[in-house]
Image (cartoon, rainbow, N blue to C red):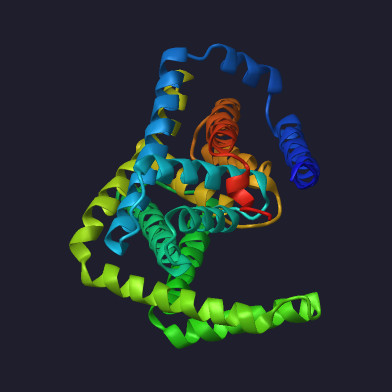
């Protein structure tokens, strides 16, 4: 395990360094770095600590939302376990360059293993939680953009095009996920194609028949669980509420960071940047946490929306210090707490 852990870190660190280098180059050419550092040094620690509190509450409520997706499916575990698995999933998301995919898979695996429930049930809760998060993202981005247009706020063409691209991409992704949830035959064919692909790549080392049997059982449980959630809409009230509050806290974090720098920014503008950057970070492009790309997008968007570029860069650095590096630390603590063996199972 130690060897595998070292290999993972060795593969991850170069990508992180490359991403950071790209962002530093961006700062060098477009931002007054000494001025940015001076702005950061003037930070009001009280408001920045409030941003830390917002992040912790965001994580707590996000975990509660998933927990209340699990309960109607009779996946009964203590909330502390749900919270730990969310922290570990976040840690894996940030460390492994497959944002959202690796984290959701690890959460589903750990919850299924700990609860002893069929993996299909747990995956149904994870997918439902992901759908809800995407709907909230799309809705908040659409509403905030329309409100600016109604108020006759002139959005730069680049920002407007990016909003349309993100909204369209999210909508298409949602439609595809909904089809997989509602059309069992389509899901079966998709899984079968994936298994055949991996069997071809691994050239006989994959036990296709055994995996197909397990996949069929998991898919049956998955679709039954989706039907259960659909038949009990009242059970979705709490996860929807917790998800919306968690989303608000994510935007509040950005607001508090700007306030700590003495430059408050409109919640509407912050919502647009937050929605776009969150969507980009969920695209698995091969860089852990999309370090470099997300920072450039955030800094540029704040600048295009009227925030001085030095302040934009300073705020981005401080926001990402919390949403990436502090969350990475929390996840690392959770991994140590639960024990590394839980992540790989009993190897005997």
Query: Where residue 124 sits: x, y (%)?
Result: 41, 66
Is 109 left or right of 178, judged from the image as shown? right
Q: Position of residue 281 (x, y in %)?
A: 57, 50
Picture quadrant where residue 259 is located: top left
Which percent across, then down, holds residue 217? 47, 78
| Nearest the eye: 192 or 183 | 192
Residue 227 vs 31, above or below: the answer is: below
In which quadrant of the rendered image does the C terminus lie? bottom right
Instruction: Mark yes or no: residue 325 visible.
Output: yes
**Could you say where residue 46 lies in the image, as x and y percent from the top left?**
42, 14
320 up-or-down from 224: above or below: above
* Residue 340 or residue 293, whichever sits in front: 340
* x 47%, y 52%: residue: 114
- Residue most extreme to the front: 348
State which quadrant residue 292 falls in. Answer: top right
Closer to the camera, 67 or 281? 67
Q: 308 or 12, which is in the foreground?
A: 12
The answer to whether one can see residue 265 in this image is: no
Does residue 98 appear to the left or right of 22 in the view shown?
left
Residue drawn 39% across the image and 58% down it: 129
Count of marks placed on residues: 0
Residue at 22% across / 59% down in the picture? 235
Give the answer, above or below, for where 241 lies relative to 339.
Answer: below
Q: Is residue 340 left or right of residue 304?
A: right
């Amino acid at each position: 395990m130690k060897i595998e852990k070292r290999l993972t870190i060795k593969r991850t660190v170069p990508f992180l360094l490359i991403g950071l280098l790209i962002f530093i180059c961006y700062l060098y050419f477009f931002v007054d770095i000494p001025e940015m550092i001076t702005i950061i040094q003037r930070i009001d620690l009280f408001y920045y600590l409030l941003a830390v509190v917002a992040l912790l509450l965001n994580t707590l409520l996000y975990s509660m939302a998933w927990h209340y997706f699990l309960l109607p499916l009779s996946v009964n575990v203590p909330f502390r376990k749900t919270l730990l698995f969310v922290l570990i999933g976040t840690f894996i998301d940030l460390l492994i360059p497959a944002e959202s995919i690796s984290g959701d898979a690890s959460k589903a695996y750990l919850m299924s293993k700990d609860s002893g429930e069929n993996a299909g049930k747990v995956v149904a809760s994870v997918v439902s939680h992901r759908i809800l998060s995407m709907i909230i993202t799309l809705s908040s981005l659409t509403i905030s953009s329309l409100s600016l247009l109604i108020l006759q706020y002139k959005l730069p063409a680049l920002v407007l095009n990016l909003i349309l691209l993100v909204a369209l991409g999210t909508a298409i992704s949602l439609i595809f996920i909904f089809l997989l949830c509602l059309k069992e035959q389509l899901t079966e064919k998709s899984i079968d194609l994936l298994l055949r692909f991996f069997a071809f790549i691994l050239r006989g080392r994959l036990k296709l028949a055994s995996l197909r049997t397990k996949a069929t059982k998991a898919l049956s449980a998955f679709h039954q669980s989706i039907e259960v959630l659909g038949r009990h809409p009242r059970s979705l009230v709490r996860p929807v509420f917790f998800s919306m509050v968690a989303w608000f806290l994510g935007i509040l974090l950005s607001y508090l960071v700007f306030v700590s720098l003495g430059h408050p920014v409109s919640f509407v503008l912050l919502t647009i940047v937050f929605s776009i950057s969150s969507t980009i970070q969920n695209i698995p492009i091969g860089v852990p946490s999309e370090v470099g790309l997300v920072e450039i997008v955030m800094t540029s968007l704040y600048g295009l929306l009227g925030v001085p570029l030095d302040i934009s860069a300073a705020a981005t650095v401080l926001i990402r210090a919390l949403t990436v590096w502090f969350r990475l630390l929390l996840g690392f603590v959770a991994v140590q707490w639960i024990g590394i063996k839980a992540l790989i199972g009993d190897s005997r």
